[in-house]
């Protein structure tokens, strides 16, 4: 595998963030969306990690690893596939579950038949970490998605070095050039890219990019509101040869079945599963909506 050449790391500016009652964030008096504020924090945290672990160290680790696992055959197989998520909390719901042992939860997901496991690694608002991803990788052979707000090549290196097989790219968070560059760099690393969209313009960008795996997120990342009807509205604009993932608004098999009828090949589910007392059965119920 030929590894991509990444630029030198740069220290990023630290900004002070406060939360207004309207859930609009402000930096130095300039209103920010929830997404923009999350990304600001992500950049600050990434800058700190870059000072500790340089690109070269991550590339050395990656060079010694086995190739990434390919989730696409499972995603394209008959029936509804499930990406089960390790998720402690969210900006919209707060604390969801006290996951002391993410590896144990991942093993339960794998036993239930999850086609892939998503691990939240953003720490400020989701309570995740790369340590969670490393622990899950050591516990299961299932393909793993690094679920984070990826805005720089360094995060792709981190993802692969920690054992991820997939990486999330959120169209709303990236310019056209950034999206294309990060998608190319991720695929050069052997990562399968889940390209996430929220509206028609973003969907067209993902299609034009040639992304084989497209996630339609029913949650507006600027307001955190969920609009389940958005999936049905956008899926018609995605070619049939792409794999489509339904994200957000899935509280159980009924929601999964609705998305399946509307054209989902895969559902990504976090909150409902981490709050389920039996994650093995929870994954199986979601997978069983076709039977």
Image (cartoon, rainbow, N blue to C red):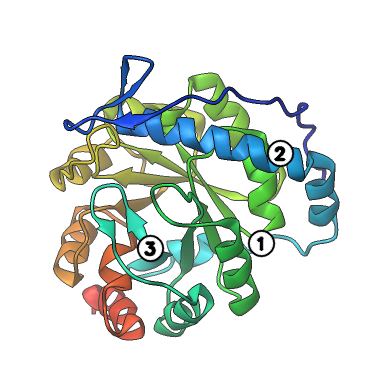
Q: Quadrant of residue 183?
A: top right
Nearest-to-viewer mark from 2 and 1: 2
Q: Secondary structure at mark 2?
A: helix
Question: What is the spatial separation of the Cα atoms under label 3 and label 2, in whole angstroms?
Answer: 25 Å
Residue 139 placement: quadrant: bottom right
Residue drawn at (79%, 54%) of the image: 62
Determine whether 113 is above or below 117 in the image: below
Tell me residue 143's x, y (percent). 56, 66
Is residue 198 shown above or below 79?
above
Task: Report which quarter residue 86 is drawn in.
Answer: bottom left
Secondary structure under the numbered disc 3 in the rendered image: loop
Asked which secondary structure carries label 1, the reply is loop
**Dot 3 or dot 2, earlier in sequence:** 2
In this view of the protein, can residue 186 be seen by the observer? no
Q: Nearer the viewer, residue 154 or 41?
A: 41
Mark 2 or 1 closer to N-term?
2
In the image, taking residue 159 as reference, residue 17 lies left or right, namely left
Mark 3 or mark 1, whichever is nearer to me: 3
With 175 as the anchor, is 141 left or right in this view? right
- Whether residue 90 is visible here, answered yes or no, is yes
Q: Is residue 116 depicted above or below 211 in this figure? A: below
How many residues crowd mark 2 within 10 Å: few (<14), some (14–19), many (20+)?
some
Q: Quadrant of the C terminus?
A: bottom left
Give x and y (percent) for residue 41. 48, 35
Q: As drawn, is 171 to the left or to the right of 247?
A: right
Q: Is residue 57 left or right of residue 213?
A: right
Q: Which residue is mark 1?
A: 163
Task: Using the image, tell me which numbered label, if any, was put on residue 137.
Answer: none
Q: What residue did someone put label 3 on?
A: 88
Q: Earlier in the sequence, mark 3 or mark 1?
A: 3
Q: Which residue is mark 2?
A: 50
Residue drawn at x 40%, y 41% is: 196
């Amino acid at each position: 595998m030929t590894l991509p050449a990444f630029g030198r790391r740069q220290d990023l500016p630290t900004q002070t963030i406060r939360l207004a009652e309207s859930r609009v964030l402000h930096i130095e008096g300039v209103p920010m969306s929830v997404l923009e504020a999350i990304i600001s924090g992500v950049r600050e945290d990434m800058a700190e990690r870059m000072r500790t672990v340089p690109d070269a160290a991550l590339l050395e680790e990656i060079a010694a690893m086995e190739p990434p696992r390919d989730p696409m055959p499972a995603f394209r197989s008959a029936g509804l596939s499930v990406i089960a998520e390790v998720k402690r909390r969210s900006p919209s719901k707060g604390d969801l579950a006290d996951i002391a042992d993410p590896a144990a939860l991942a093993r339960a997901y794998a036993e239930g038949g999850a086609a892939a496991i998503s691990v939240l690694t953003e720490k400020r608002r989701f309570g995740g970490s790369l340590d969670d991803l490393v622990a899950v990788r050591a516990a299961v052979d299932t393909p793993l998605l690094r679920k984070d707000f990826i805005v720089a090549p360094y995060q792709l290196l981190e993802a692969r070095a920690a054992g991820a097989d997939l990486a999330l790219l959120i169209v709303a968070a990236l310019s056209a050039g950034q999206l294309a560059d990060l998608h190319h760099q991720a695929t050069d690393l052997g990562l399968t890219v889940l390209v996430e969209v929220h509206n028609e313009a973003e969907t067209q960008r993902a299609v034009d990019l040639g992304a084989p795996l497209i996630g339609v997120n029913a949650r507006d990342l600027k307001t955190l509101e969920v609009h389940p009807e958005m999936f049905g509205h956008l899926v018609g604009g995605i070619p049939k040869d792409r794999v489509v993932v339904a994200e957000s608004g899935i509280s159980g098999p009924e929601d999964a079945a609705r998305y399946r009828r509307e054209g989902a090949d895969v559902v990504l589910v976090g909150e409902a599963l981490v709050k389920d007392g039996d994650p093995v059965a929870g994954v199986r119920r979601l997978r069983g909506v076709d039977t």
